[in-house]
Image (cartoon, grey):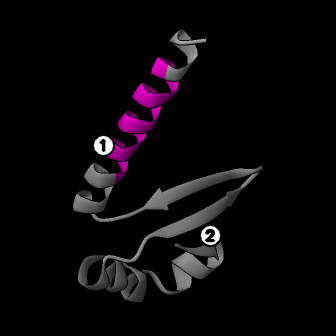
Amino acid sequence: MKEVSLDQFKAGTDEIVREILSAGDIYCVDVGKSEKIVIMEEAEYKIMREALGMVITLASKDNTQK
């Protein structure tokens, strides 16, 4: 994951979008006030969402066994 400021994103939008679409890079854009936006390809998003679901499921099973 590459982290850039909002100004860096504005200055390099075309290049960043090409990197996201061609190489599957993930970008985190710091938009200020402790807020960040993550930009990624849809396929990467689906994988991360599925992984998060698995982690939540495993954590909830672990909590019910205690």
Q: Point out the residue furthest to the right here.
A: 33
Query: Which quadrant of the figure contains the C terminus?
Result: top right
The magenta segment = 48-61
Work out whether 26 lies above or below 8.
Answer: above
Badge 2 element: helix
Residue 54 locus on image (x, y percent): 37, 36
How packed mark 2 is, by other alpha carbons closer than 10 Å (few <14, some 14-19, many 20 or more), is some
Using the image, tell me which numbered label, if any, was put on residue 6: 2
Which residue does the image show at 24% across and 58% down from the upper left?
A: 42
Badge 1 element: helix
Inspect the magenta stretch and tell me whether residue 60 lies in it. yes
Viewer-closest of 25 and 52: 52
Dividing the picture into quadrants, the one containing residue 43 is bottom left
Q: Point out the residue furthest to the front here.
A: 65
Task: Give the mark toward the camera: 2 or 1.
Answer: 1
Image position of 60 (left or right of 41): right
Residue 14 locus on image (x, y percent): 37, 85
Viewer-closest of 33 and 66: 66
Which residue does the image show at 39% across and 89% down from the upper left?
A: 15
Q: What residue type is labelled 2?
A: Leu
Which residue does the image show at 51% across and 27% down from the upper left?
A: 59
Inspect the magenta stretch and tell me whether residue 9 lies in it. no
Q: Mark 1 points at which residue?
A: 50
